[in-house]
Image: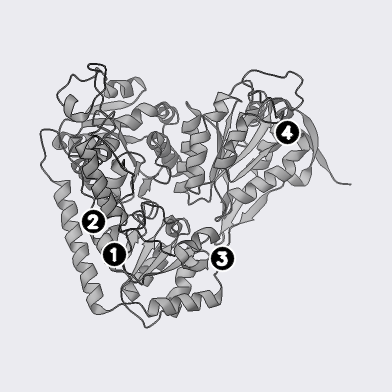
């Protein structure tokens, strides 16, 4: 006779999650390491009751914003190389839909996050209930259906026994290197509290094995032949290098063959910044060294990259007429991009297999010399931008330089939206494979502080430096409170440029003078542009005071010297520190022979827009189909 355990659906879910483990390379550990939650009538008596009843099963963490807790979970999973995850539970209605942005960011960045929102009554007896979406032509829809496009697995548990296959399917996706992303199990509030006799086997310790898939042998041979025939190959290292822990294998390949490496945002840290093969960031936010090598490269070896428009500079980065692509990726869809030779498999073992087939082969000596010259020239450019001596307000590049100089080799920098991710991609000198954490797949304003908290939660032994602009800070600063509550110290450098500086710069470059991007009072009925308001009255907003009110220790810095003193002083403080530093919004970092396609009006009454359109058309002419 099969034994069973009588539990509510919510109690069964918590118990099931508590016994899920993951294994790779013989290292085994727990997969779901806790649950963030904000409770309402849709989950407080279900999942809330289950968490409270047996707190030893799954650690509960309190958050201040539903979107924020999903960002925390994403930062946690990224820091753990996708081998551990957190769950997030909310009430129905606005509590659930607040998670949509976080779900989209997690899925786009291929990070495992489990979402457990409440849902309306499966019985439909008290229909319509508070926060229920009434759809006249469909009785089975709720607001949770809006998560379908932004999750990798979606299900609604309409009966208590449906939890068994749904939970197993959710875990398969969460632990899959190829298919992972946000996973949602929508939980009707009446079903959460229903009891069912679950099979005891459902709660036994389960291990999900994450293997290392090896590509087809013939495909490896063909790819090696293409690389051997090349004269100017270039590796584009993406996030897959880091997630598969392929850094050592990549360094060995690069050292032996001389193939240089350009890094995507997610792949930055694949090589230490001072490695002889490291050309730095590539693409629209790339370095002069990487972009010049990419323009002439005859073979591009993409490893763990999905070739976003920033990586390819909107299909303008690779200008060699005969350029070919060899793509290493665990996802078949990504390995086939740009009509490349597809090596569908784990990055580490695939690099090792290619290394064997390339034994005895190296790039030409003159190519090594050229790459080394460009690398050294770029290093000097970084040093120049770190020490501009700009005034009266410092340049943003100087802020990054000060933090980079004073942070430790294992410390982690966290950023997301605005102009800083681009500057960091170019300028940050990464020393550790996990030392660079920038969310740029979705470029989510508000990710920084929450994501930084996830990083710190994943590895409390590292110091975390969150770089956040004033615009992004205003969107989501609440998780400072969570960092205080959990005693997880963050070092937050709040860069204040009085507005949306990134879009302001983009706007000016396209002829619209920074319209609607400066924080100023309305004048003559308009919010105007940067030029008209450059000397206008500032708003009486004190973000440093706001951070202090949230519990952080605040230090104000008006210069780079004061910033450096503040970073040093912050090391001795035992709780979250916010260093507020104003910068010159107009002093940016060049694009270094790269381009990003942002459409410009074909006709306009503005001479500046017409000039920008002419420049845009010159960029369009450089695009390649790459088929």
Q: Residue at x 27, y 60 (%)?
A: 291
Query: Crowding at label 4, few (<14), some or many (≥20) Cα neighbours within 10 Å?
Result: many
State whether residue 240 is above or below residue 129. Answer: below
**Gap between marks 4 and 1 measured at Cα:** 57 Å
Q: Secondary structure at mark 4?
A: helix
* Image location (x, y in percent) of residue 426: 26, 51
The residue lying toward the viewer, choosing from 282 and 569, is: 282
Q: Secondary structure at mark 2?
A: loop
The residue lying toward the viewer, choosing from 45 and 471, is: 471
* Image location (x, y in percent) of residue 268: 35, 54
Q: Secondary structure at mark 1?
A: helix
The numbered disc on residue 213 is 3
Q: Nearer the viewer, mark 4 or mark 3?
A: 3
Looking at marks 4 and 2 on the same chain, the residue that comes earlier in the sequence is marked by 4
The residue lying toward the viewer, choosing from 578 and 286, is: 286
Residue topped by disc 2 = 593
Does the residue at mark 1 contact the one at mark 3 (Cβ under 8 Å)?
no
The residue lying toward the viewer, choosing from 325 and 68, is: 325
Looking at marks 2 and 3 on the same chain, the residue that comes earlier in the sequence is marked by 3
State whether residue 577 is above or below residue 376. Answer: above
Looking at marks 1 and 3 on the same chain, the residue that comes earlier in the sequence is marked by 3
Q: Residue at x 32, y 60 (%)?
A: 317
Does the residue at mark 2 contact the one at mark 1 (Cβ under 8 Å)?
yes
Residue topped by disc 1 = 295
Looking at marks 4 and 1 on the same chain, the residue that comes earlier in the sequence is marked by 4
* Image location (x, y in percent) of residue 347: 47, 64
Q: Is residue 423 visible?
A: yes
Query: Crowding at label 3, few (<14), some or many (≥20) Cα neighbours within 10 Å?
Result: some
Residue topped by disc 4 = 9
Q: Nearer the viewer, mark 4 or mark 2?
A: 2
Q: Nearer the viewer, mark 2 or mark 3?
A: 2
* Relative to 355, 576 lies left or right: left
């Amino acid at each position: 006779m099969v034994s069973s355990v009588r539990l509510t659906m919510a109690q069964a879910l918590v118990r099931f999650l508590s016994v899920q483990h993951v294994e790779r390379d013989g290292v085994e550990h727990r997969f779901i390491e806790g649950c963030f939650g904000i409770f309402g009538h849709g989950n407080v008596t279900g999942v809330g009751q289950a968490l409270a009843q047996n707190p030893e099963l799954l650690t509960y963490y309190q958050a201040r914003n539903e979107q924020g807790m999903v960002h925390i979970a994403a930062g946690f999973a990224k820091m753990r190389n996708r081998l551990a995850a957190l769950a997030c539970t909310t009430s129905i209605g606005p509590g659930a839909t607040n998670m949509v942005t976080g779900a989209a960011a997690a899925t786009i960045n291929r990070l495992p996050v489990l979402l457990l929102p409440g849902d309306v009554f499966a019985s439909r007896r008290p229909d319509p209930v508070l926060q229920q979406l009434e759809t006249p032509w469909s009785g089975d829809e709720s607001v949770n259906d809006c998560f379908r496009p932004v999750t990798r697995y979606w299900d609604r548990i309409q009966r208590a026994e449906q939890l068994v296959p749904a939970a197993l399917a959710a875990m398969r996706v969460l632990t899959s290197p190829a298919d992972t992303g946000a996973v949602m199990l929508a939980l009707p509030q009446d079903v959460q509290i229903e009891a069912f006799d679950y099979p005891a086997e459902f709660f036994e310790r389960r291990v999900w094995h994450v293997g290392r898939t090896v590509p087809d042998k013939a495909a490896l041979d063909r790819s090696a032949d293409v690389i051997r025939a090349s004269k100017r190959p270039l590796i584009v290292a993406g996030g897959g290098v880091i997630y598969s822990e392929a850094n050592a294998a990549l360094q060995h390949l690069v050292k032996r063959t001389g193939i240089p490496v350009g890094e995507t945002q997610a792949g930055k840290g694949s090589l230490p910044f001072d490695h002889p093969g490291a050309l730095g960031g590539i693409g629209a936010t790339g370095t002069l060294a990487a972009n010049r090598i990419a323009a002439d490269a005859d073979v591009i070896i993409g490893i763990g990259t999905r070739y976003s428009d920033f990586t390819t500079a909107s299909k303008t980065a690779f200008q060699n007429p005969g350029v070919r692509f060899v793509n290493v990726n665990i996802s078949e869809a990504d390995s086939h991009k740009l009509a490349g030779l597809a090596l569908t498999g784990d990055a580490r073992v695939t690099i090792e297999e290619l290394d064997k087939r390339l034994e005895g082969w190296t790039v030409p000596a003159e190519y090594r010399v050229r790459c080394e010259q460009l690398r050294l020239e770029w290093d000097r450019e970084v040093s120049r931008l770190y020490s501009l001596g700009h005034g009266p307000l410092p340049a943003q590049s100087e802020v990054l330089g000060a933090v980079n100089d004073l942070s430790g080799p294992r410390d982690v920098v966290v950023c997301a939206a605005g102009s800083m991710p681009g500057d960091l991609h170019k300028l940050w000198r990464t020393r550790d494979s996990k030392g660079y954490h920038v969310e740029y797949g979705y470029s989510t304003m508000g990710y920084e502080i929450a994501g930084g908290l996830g990083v710190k939660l994943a590895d409390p032994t590292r110091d975390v430096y969150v770089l956040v602009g004033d615009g992004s800070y205003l969107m989501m600063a609440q998780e400072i409170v969570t960092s205080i509550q959990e005693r997880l110290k963050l070092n937050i450098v709040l860069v204040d440029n009085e507005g949306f500086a990134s879009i302001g710069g983009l706007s000016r470059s396209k002829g619209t003078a920074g319209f609607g991007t400066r924080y100023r009072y309305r004048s003559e009925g308009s919010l105007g542009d940067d030029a008209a308001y450059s000397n206008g009255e500032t708003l009486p907003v004190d973000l440093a005071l706001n951070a202090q009110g949230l519990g952080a220790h605040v230090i104000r810095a008006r210069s780079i010297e004061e910033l450096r003193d503040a970073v040093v002083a912050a090391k001795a403080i035992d709780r979250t520190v916010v260093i507020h530093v104003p910068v010159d919004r107009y002093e940016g970092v060049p694009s270094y022979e790269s381009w990003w396609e942002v459409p410009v009006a074909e006709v306009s009454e503005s001479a500046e827009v017409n000039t920008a359109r002419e420049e845009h058309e010159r960029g369009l002419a450089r695009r390649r189909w790459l088929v």
